[in-house]
């Protein structure tokens, strides 16, 4: 099997080969995993990530996009975060989470909220939320999540900045190798209160506000 895998040079053919190992059917340019178990879905994406050939971009939308457009980002935390680009991740957890996170619903519940994620010392992905969103999570509001798409992208088309960690970017529109439809039920395995989910502390919220509104901070200091 290893020798067979090494002979597959085409990215799409390689992906089809992996899908075949999982008994998955590719229809057109997408795979629908909504009827698969959470464990099967995670294992499939982790296998793709382990090949080192692919990157992943999650979008919470009912519509599938044939092309991902390069858009202006605004992340002053790293040099590569302010480009007009398509951003993708070599890991799987963050893109899967992004595909499930129903921001349209959250905006209907609150005018302002903050979400973020990072890895702890053990390498586990931890998602953090402002208090208003954290309370919705604790209440078990399932409307916070909805089915979405994870786009599998050719890693050869992207670059990785020194300060970007697992995040890669491409400064031109990108056609996905394939689109994968996932179910909101996957949120049960990703967003776990007391394990992978935490609330921003008041001190952290203050720092974020100062970072996002430096002019406000200067004005208050001058008073």
Image (cartoon, grey):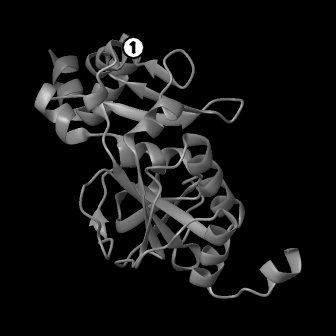
Identify whether 178 is placed above or below 45: below
Residue at the (82%, 82%) spot, across then down: 4
Question: Is residue 53 something that shows in the picture?
Answer: no
Foreground residue among 222 and 92: 92
Query: Taking 15 as reference, is 25 left or right?
Result: left
Residue 213 percent location from the top left of the image? 23, 33
Q: Mark 1 points at which residue?
A: 203
Residue at the (51%, 23%) spot, across then down: 192
Foreground residue among 178 and 119: 178
Residue 68 percent location from the top left of the image? 33, 71
Foreground residue among 99 and 94: 99
Q: Is mark 1 on a helix, strand or loop?
A: helix
Question: Is residue 129 something that shows in the picture?
Answer: yes
Identify whether 183 is placed above or below 17: above
Residue 58 percent location from the top left of the image? 40, 55
Where does the N terminus fall, quadrant-wise?
A: bottom right
Query: Taking 183 as reference, is 214 left or right?
Result: left
Residue at the (60%, 59%) spot, across then down: 162
Identify whether 162 is placed above or below 154: above
Where does the C terminus fall, quadrant-wise?
A: top left
Q: How many marks?
A: 1
Residue 57 percent location from the top left of the image? 44, 59
Toward which corner of the image does residue 142 lie, by quadrant?
top left
Toward which corner of the image does residue 38 lie, by quadrant?
top right
Q: Mark 1, residues whose alpha carbon is within 10 Å: few (<14), some, or many (≥20)?
A: few
Query: Taking 67 as reference, is 164 left or right?
Result: right
Identify whether 214 is placed above or below 91: above
């Amino acid at each position: 099997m290893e020798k067979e895998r090494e002979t597959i040079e085409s990215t799409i053919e390689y992906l089809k080969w992996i899908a075949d190992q999982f008994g998955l059917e590719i229809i057109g340019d997408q795979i629908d995993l909504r009827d698969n178990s959470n464990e099967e879905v995670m294992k499939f994406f982790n296998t793709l990530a382990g090949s080192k050939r692919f990157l992943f971009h999650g979008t919470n939308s009912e519509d599938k996009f044939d092309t991902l457009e390069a858009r202006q980002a605004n992340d002053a935390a790293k040099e590569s975060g302010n480009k007009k680009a398509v951003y993708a991740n070599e890991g799987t957890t963050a893109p899967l989470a992004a595909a499930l996170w129903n921001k349209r619903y959250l905006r209907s519940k609150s005018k302002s909220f903050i979400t973020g994620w990072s890895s702890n010392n053990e390498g586990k992905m931890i998602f953090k939320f402002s208090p208003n969103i954290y309370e919705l999570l604790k209440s078990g509001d399932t409307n916070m999540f909805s089915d979405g798409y994870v786009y599998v992208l050719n890693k050869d088309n992207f670059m990785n900045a020194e300060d970007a960690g697992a995040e890669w970017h491409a400064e031109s529109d990108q056609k996905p190798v394939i689109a994968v439809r996932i179910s909101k039920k996957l949120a049960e395995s990703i967003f776990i209160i007391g394990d992978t989910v935490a609330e921003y502390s008041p001190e952290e919220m203050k720092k974020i506000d100062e970072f996002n509104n430096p002019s406000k901070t200067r004005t208050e200091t001058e008073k």
